[in-house]
């Protein structure tokens, strides 16, 4: 967009000049006033002229009468001289005085003159001989029309001249007090619009324009300061953008690294002919990298919560010995793997319990200790702990003999998306979020995180958190009160620990198969719905001890389905099952009517706890004697792979049967059941074939109500078959 230059000289921009507009207004006002004044003044010109001549004639007659009776009597020359002197005073061009036979004329007689009036004076003129004569006074004037026209012209010229002087003066005044300041303001504004924020208006007046100039200059000062702030903010934003770009590139690397291991080892397992025991290293690697990937995602979620100021902390009683024990059990193996010494040194007394957020406190300490291990190649990492009872805070010092940092590095490490430098990222990896999150979390917990470090000598990270009141807290005084515990790498699979019916609502087929396997191994009878609409239909028509409800699904979402069920009086337990793990997502689930919440990826221990909470605990948990081992596998162990593949496909087959049964799709149900009848015996599981035969008989009889019990039995038999695969594997490998 092009801006037209504005000049202070109105001649350069007369179309928009205020001076021209003001002058035009003044001109029109002047013309209007002139016309009005002229019309008013000329309205009685003729009458005024007649009155003037009458008055002057009367005055002249009076003075002439007095003169004629004076003693000594004036001569005719004296009278002529007197009249001649009065021509200009009384405005008559010609005066004629007749005394008897004597005719005295003053002025010059011309043809256009007309008689004003002829008057006989009451006084008589005395002669030398004693006689008297009548005195006649005749006055002449210019023709009345000529006088009126001359008078009008003079009046018009006078009025116009006066008004012109007034208009010019008024225009000059307006231009000085109004137009010039406005032009100056416009000119300054133009320079400001072109980026010159140093321009200022002169303040030499105290009126409204003076105030306007002052306010305008103050506005420019504010704009100048704001411009400085914006420039600084722009630089910071550019730096933040560069940092985030580097972070995204680094994050891509961090995510792809565990994904490479997960996908690679999963591909190896897919084509492996080894037993599960022989593939345990690959399986452990997949699980470890999956947990690492989950931790990266959790860090990003924590960052988004902090930046949105939505990080919520649930303060509760925290057992310090348990925190220390958990920390040692995780960090000691890491240190041992790098041949580093790891020690925990406690300055007693130490409170046994404090009021804090256990998950966040452990997150801070694990991150700092893991960092110390990662950046230390030789020497030691130690954790010093002490409590300041008066200040009611507990202090953790993580000290290492690692690579250390320079002052420049220290100034950046607590920034989001930042590490000491790019070489650190290349050599050691990491997202650059850990220290930033740890510092933010420490501050939320009422403390702080700081660092002291020397390059090539090591670092000391000091983190403090508030303990809450310590007046009624028990204190530990020696190392014996700190127990040691061993952390298992995985939660053992539970088998036949519960009894009951579960409706699993999940649109992902892979998740359906996985969760169905978990639940059926626990002993539950599982029915699957692929969206909320199907879930509502099944929950309305069948009894379930528990519904596991995914949130985001096609056709009808989970929360919509839960709200619909609760609205129509459904009172059985419903647990949300969702990948949306934010606190606000949890609140939405509870608000919709859910009783519990499980986040994805599903933690088996959390799943087991929820299931055991709502289903009946199986007191007669079968041992290995209750497991069903394939007859084919017993006769020929070399068939293990094909039998295992068959067993792995059972959850999908059962799901098809449950779905067809729920939808009353008897043709589909008959087809799947027929497949089960034909394959069960062939793979060494006659119990499956027997159940399928009974179900087929009920189908022919249309005794559909009896099929539900057989489906529950079939699910339980499959759980025993899963257990039998583990037993068979152990027997083969033993």
Image: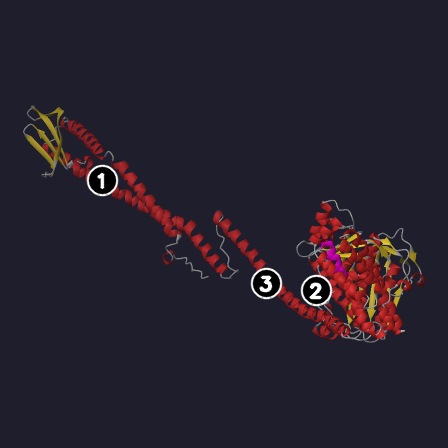
| Residue 408 in sight in this render | no
- Residue identified by numbered label 3: 231
Query: Is 649 part of what is drawn in magenta?
Result: no
- Secondary structure beneath dot 3 equals helix
Check disc 1 and report the residue beneath it.
Answer: 152
Tag 1 and tag 2, C-beta contact below 8 Å: no
Q: Which mark is residue 416?
A: 2
Q: Quadrant of residue 466?
A: bottom right
- How would you rate the neighbour count of disc 1 (Cα within 10 Å): few for under 14, some for 14-19, many for 20 or more? some
Residue 277 placement (x, y as % from top left)? 85, 72
- Residue 718 position, x and y percent, is 82, 62
Among the 4 quarters of the image, the one containing residue 423: bottom right
Which residues fall within the magenta stretch? 654-664
Going from the N terminus, do you reach mark 3 or mark 2 first?
3
Q: Nearer the viewer, residue 472 or 734?
A: 734
Label 1 or label 2, whichever comes before in sequence order:
1
């Amino acid at each position: 967009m092009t801006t037209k230059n504005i000049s202070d000289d109105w001649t350069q921009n007369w179309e928009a000049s205020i001076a021209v507009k003001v002058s035009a207004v003044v001109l029109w006002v002047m013309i209007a006033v002139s016309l009005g004044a002229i019309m008013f003044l000329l309205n009685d010109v003729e009458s005024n002229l007649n009155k003037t001549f009458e008055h002057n004639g009367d005055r002249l007659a009076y003075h002439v009468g007095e003169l004629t009776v004076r003693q000594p009597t004036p001569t005719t020359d004296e009278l002529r001289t007197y009249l001649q002197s009065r021509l200009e005073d009384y405005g008559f061009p010609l005066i004629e005085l007749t005394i008897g036979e004597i005719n005295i004329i003053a002025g010059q007689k011309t043809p256009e003159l007309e008689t004003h009036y002829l008057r006989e004076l009451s006084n008589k003129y005395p002669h030398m001989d004693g006689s008297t004569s009548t005195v006649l006074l005749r006055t002449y004037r210019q023709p009345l029309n000529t006088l009126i026209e001359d008078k009008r012209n003079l009046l018009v010229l006078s009025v116009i001249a006066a008004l012109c002087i007034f208009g010019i003066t008024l225009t000059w005044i307006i231009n000085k007090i109004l137009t010039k300041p406005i032009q100056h303001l416009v000119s300054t504004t133009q320079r400001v619009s072109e980026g010159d924020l140093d321009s200022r208006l002169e303040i030499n007046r105290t009126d409204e324009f003076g105030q306007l100039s002052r306010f305008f200059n103050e506005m420019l000062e504010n704009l100048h300061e704001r411009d400085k702030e914006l420039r600084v903010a722009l630089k910071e934003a550019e730096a933040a953008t560069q940092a985030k770009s580097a972070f995204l590139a680094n994050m891509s690397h961090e995510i792809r690294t565990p994904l490479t291991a997960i996908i690679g080892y999963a591909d190896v397992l897919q084509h492996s002919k080894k037993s599960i025991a022989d593939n345990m290293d690959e399986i452990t690697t997949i699980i470890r990298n999956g947990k690492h990937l989950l931790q990266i995602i959790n860090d990003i979620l924590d960052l988004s919560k902090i930046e949105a100021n939505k990080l919520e902390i649930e303060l509760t009683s925290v057992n310090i010995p348990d925190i220390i024990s958990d920390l040692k059990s995780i960090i000691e193996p890491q240190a041992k793997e790098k041949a580093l010494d790891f020690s925990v040194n406690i300055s007693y007394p130490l409170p046994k319990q404090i009021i804090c957020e256990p998950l966040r406190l452990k997150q801070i300490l694990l991150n700092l200790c893991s960092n110390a291990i990662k950046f230390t190649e030789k020497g030691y990492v130690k954790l010093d702990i002490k409590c300041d009872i008066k200040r009611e805070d507990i202090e953790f010092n993580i000290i290492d003999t690692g690579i250390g940092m320079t002052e420049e590095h220290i100034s950046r490490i607590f920034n989001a998306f930042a590490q000491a430098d790019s070489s650190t990222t290349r050599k050691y990896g990491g997202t650059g979020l850990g220290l930033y999150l740890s510092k933010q979390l420490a501050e939320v917990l009422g403390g702080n995180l700081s660092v002291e470090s020397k390059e090539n000598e090591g670092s000391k990270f000091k983190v403090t958190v508030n303990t809450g009141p310590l007046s009624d807290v028990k204190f530990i005084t020696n190392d014996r009160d700190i127990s040691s515990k061993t952390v298992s790498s995985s939660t053992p699979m539970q088998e036949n620990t519960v009894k009951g019916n579960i409706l699993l609502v999940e649109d992902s087929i892979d998740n359906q198969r996985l969760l169905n396997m978990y639940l059926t191994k626990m002993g539950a009878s599982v029915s699957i719905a692929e969206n909320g609409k199907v879930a509502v239909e099944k929950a309305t028509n069948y009894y379930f001890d528990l519904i596991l409800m995914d949130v985001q699904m096609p056709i009808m979402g989970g929360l919509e389905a839960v709200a619909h069920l609760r609205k129509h009086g459904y009172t059985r337990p419903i647990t949300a099952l969702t990948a949306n793990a934010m606190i606000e997502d949890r609140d939405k689930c509870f608000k919709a009517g859910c009783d519990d919440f499980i986040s994805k990826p599903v933690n088996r221990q959390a799943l087991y706890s929820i299931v055991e909470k709502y289903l009946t605990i199986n007191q007669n948990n079968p041992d290995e004697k209750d497991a069903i081992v394939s007859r084919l596998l017993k006769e020929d162990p070399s068939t293990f792979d094909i039998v295992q593949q068959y067993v792995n496909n059972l959850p999908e087959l059962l799901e098809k049967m449950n779905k067809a049964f729920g939808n009353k799709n008897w043709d589909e149900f008959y087809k799947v059941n027929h497949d089960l009848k034909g394959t069960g015996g062939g793979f060494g599981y006659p119990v499956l074939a027997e159940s399928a035969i009974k179900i087929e008989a009920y189908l022919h009889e249309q005794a559909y109500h009896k099929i539900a019990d057989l489906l529950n039995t079939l699910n339980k038999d499959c759980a025993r078959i899963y257990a039998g695969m583990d037993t068979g594997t152990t027997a083969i490998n033993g």
